[in-house]
Amino acid sequence: MSPNETSRTSGGGGSRLAEALTPGRIGMAVLAIVTLVFIFQNTREVRIRLLVPEVSMPLYLALLATALIGAACGGYAAARRRK
């Protein structure tokens, strides 16, 4: 048996949940929840200008769109870094 195999089997039956809940994942989950609460607390109508057109929309939609674009950019950058 290799050292990798023995460490996996001799862990005393560690649960998969404990392995999945790392401090980094918990922190990101808390940050995501706080972000969503902030977004949905801001519901007033705002005017947004993107280059030339000006649109009127609820602030939470603009914040949500910005968060999704940021998450997509972060995911793309992380995927490129792994290569």
Image: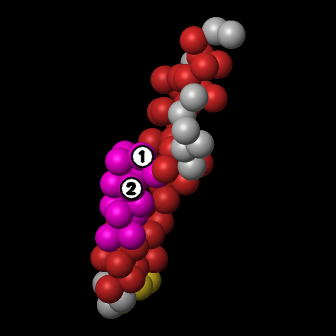
Q: Secondary structure at mark 1?
A: loop
Closest to the observer: 9 or 80?
Answer: 9
Q: Principal SS element in the magenta part?
A: helix
Among the 4 quarters of the image, the one containing residue 13: top right
Look at the image and give the residue range highlighted in magenta: 21-34
Note whether 27 is above or below 55 in the view shown.
above
Residue type at numbered disc 1: Thr
The residue carrying pointer 2 sits among few (fewer than 14), some (14 to 19) or many (20 or more) residues within 10 Å by Cα, namely few
Residue 1 in view of the camera = yes
The picture places residue 12, in percent across and down from the top left corner, at 55, 38
Q: Residue furthest bottom?
A: 44
The residue under the point 36% across, 88% down is 43
The residue under the point 49% across, 59% down is 68
Residue type at numbered disc 2: Ile
> What residue would you read off at disc 2?
26
Closest to the observer: 37 or 11?
Answer: 11
Query: Disc 2, disc 1: CB below 8 Å?
Result: yes
